[in-house]
Image (cartoon, coloured by chain):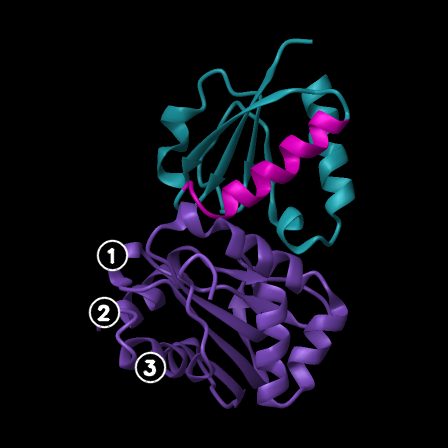
Chain colours: A purple, B cyan
Amino acid sequence: MRGNLIFIKDLLNVDITARTQEELFTILSKPLSDNGFTTSDYLTGVIEREKNFPTGLPTKPYGVALPHTLPKYVIKNSISVGVLKEPIKFKIMGSENDYIDAKMIFLLALRENRKQLWMLQAIMNMIRSKEILNKIATAKKDDVFEIINKNLF
Amino acid sequence: MSKKHVLFVCATGIATSTVVAEKVTQYCREKGLEIEYHQSNVASVPKNCNGIDLIISTTNIPYELDVPVIRGLNLLTGIGEDDTLKKIYDILIK
């Protein structure tokens, strides 16, 4: 934990099977609300926000998405990470009609965005690395947890 | 050269725009160009673009503006980052 950001093994899911963003967000937000890190309407907030402000990033060799929502749905700063078996489509951040196949999802639950910028920067640095993305996509859960911990904190 | 004013935009005006702003500010400073950075959420762009030389945004900007707009996505993913930074610099020194 750094800067009061929580990332525990409960908040990492690999080999996820989901066909839609809603299915995916439901899986990833469950451990956040089960642990009391977010409010019960966090999921709805994420789904709505992704429609209005898409968060897909065309990184290589795998696309990444960083869904999030307003601080009012968040109780504790935390991050839920998912690796999909088969990627699903996300609209690219800032685009009108461009999509990427997202394989890794970093679902952010942030209370005060400004204080958590180091985390956003750490994620950006992490997903620029083909090597790290390759590892996250293929490694076992415990190894993925280690890789993210090492690079995020 | 007078200071250039750049407006950084994202959905909230807090998160990704700050990551992009730090990158651009640092790049320009290394080239000897001081920029003054302003931030805005996308909804407030029309009222915040007075006196702005360039807008760099990670969200879609659904307005017609007199100010040039550059997409900041490459500065997040790192892919094509150098080209985008150079383009930004070229617009600002015109």
Does the CB distance between marks 1 and 2 fall below 8 Å?
yes
What residue would you read off at disc 2?
A39
What residue would you read off at disc 1?
A72
SS at circle 1: helix
Q: Cα distance, mark 1 to mark 2? A: 8 Å
Q: At label 3, which amino acid type do we have? A: Lys
Q: Nearer the viewer, residue A44 or B31?
A: B31
Q: Nearer the viewer, residue B77 or A8?
A: A8
Residue B94 x/y as whole percent: 72, 17
Of callouts 2 and 3, the N-terminal one: 3
Q: Residue at x 42, y 63 (%)?
A: A5
Q: Are marks 1 and 2 on the same chain?
A: yes
Residue B16 x/y as whole percent: 51, 48
What residue would you read off at disc 3?
A30
User: Magenta part mainly helix, strand or loop?
Assistant: helix
Residue A41 x/y as whole percent: 23, 69
Mark 3 crowdedness (10 Å alpha carbons): few <14, some 14-19, many ≥20: some
Q: At label 1, which amino acid type do we have? A: Lys
